[in-house]
Image: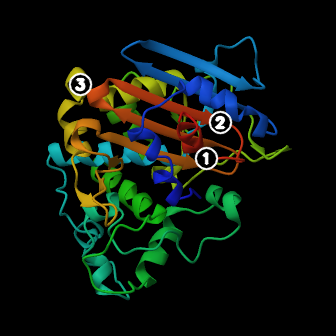
Amino acid sequence: MFRALAILAGLLAVFSGQAKTLAEAAESLSPKLPAGCIVTAELTPQGTRFALTGQSPDPTQAPETLVFEIASLTKIFTGILLAEAVLEKKVTLDTSVGELLGPDFKYTDARVGRITLKQLSTHTSGLPRMPDNFVNGFKGYASYDEAQMLAWLAKVELKQNGPHACSYSNIGVSLLGYLVAKQYGKPWTECILEKVCKPLGLTHTQPSHLPSLGTLAPPYSGDKPGIVTTFQAFAPAGSLRSTAADMLKFGQALAHPERTPLKDALTLALQPHADSNPNGGKVGLGAFRAGPPERLAYVHDGATAGYRSSIQVMPAQDTVRIVLMNNNTMEGSDVLKAMK
């Protein structure tokens, strides 16, 4: 589904001096874009700029109103939902899979039942990136349901005893979303709209199974039409679609939780909860943290069959950068790297 290592690929651009604006960086890469477009949103103390390079699917629409799949950026939303559930005392970060699935659920490997919600959110559960009963590539997300996920969970075996190093797991975050939503008695899609999108004013951010609230930029794979990805069980890991305007607003919320109705949940979600690599990188509940304290950045990349995305939030610099594109030719973080 989403290219795990690409999440951190553009981080050097966060810490070195940038010679270009985000829009200029996207423009410099446009000759490499066979089809589609790159929409950028950049907020700095100097102001806010939305821009589009490439071919707009609807030139009558402002770039910031076009809808894109944001893919794994969805995982940050699911982490915030977990934080809210913790604050509402529905779960704790140390609540285990076994506690929530109950005593009747049987595991081939008892260690799986001891995985905690925090481990699922921080990719430290020991679960693999994808389940071995998932087939048919990106098209498979439309049919892979919760019953299949739970059947796999009952049979999966961990490779070793914990604690586990951070290893990107789409199925781990999918299971997390399922378990947290179960505590609310609602599907994840309803929870994420009610508990995260609505309070933050993200009026054009929707799960993939709902109609897009705006013009959906059509997906491309190179110079050929791509596929639109829809999700069932994997929805908490990648199903959201959004606009540059909404994602900039979301980035501002991450930069300044105190200015939002979700202050405590955002603060909890953005704290460092695990190491993301041996070099001092950290991961919160969903968002990766990088850089020294004075230049701390929250970052994440996303990739589906025909879309790429990236978010970079630097609170101390009052800077938010969003990259959305409807082509799989390059990564969202490639645009951030091109700012150098």
Asked if residue 120 shows in the view, the reply is: yes
Q: Position of residue 292 (x, y in %)?
A: 26, 45
Q: Nearer the viewer, mark 1 or mark 3?
A: 1
Neighbours of disc 1 within 10 Å: few (<14), some (14-19), many (20+): many
Q: CA distance from mark 2 to mark 1?
A: 9 Å
Q: Amino acid at mark 1?
A: Glu
Residue 38 in sight: no
Image quadrant in which you'd find residue 36: top right
Q: Are marks 3 and 2 in contact (CB under 8 Å)?
A: no
Q: Nearer the viewer, mark 3 or mark 2?
A: 2
Which residue is the site of mark 3?
Answer: 261
Asked if 190 appears above or below 255 in the picture, the reply is: below
Q: In this rendering, is residue 238 above or below 240?
A: below
Query: Does label 2 or label 1 sit earlier along the sequence?
Result: 2
Question: Is residue 70 shown above or below 182?
Answer: above
Q: CA distance from mark 1 to mark 3?
A: 32 Å
Q: Residue at horizontal 44%, vertical 58%?
A: 174
Residue displayed at 56% across by 18% down: 50
Q: Are marks 1 and 3 in contact (CB under 8 Å)?
A: no
Disc number lying in front (2 or 1): 1
From the image, tell me which residue sits under label 2: 325
Where, quadrant-wise, is the N terminus in this rendering?
Answer: bottom right
Q: Earlier in the sequence, mark 3 or mark 2?
A: 3
Question: To which quarter of the image does residue 144 belong?
Answer: bottom right
Mark number displayed over residue 331 = 1
Mark 1 and mark 3 lie on one chain; the one further toward the N terminus is 3
Circle 3: element type:
loop
Give the x, y percent position of residue 100.
26, 65
Viewer-proximal residue, 234 or 120?
Answer: 120
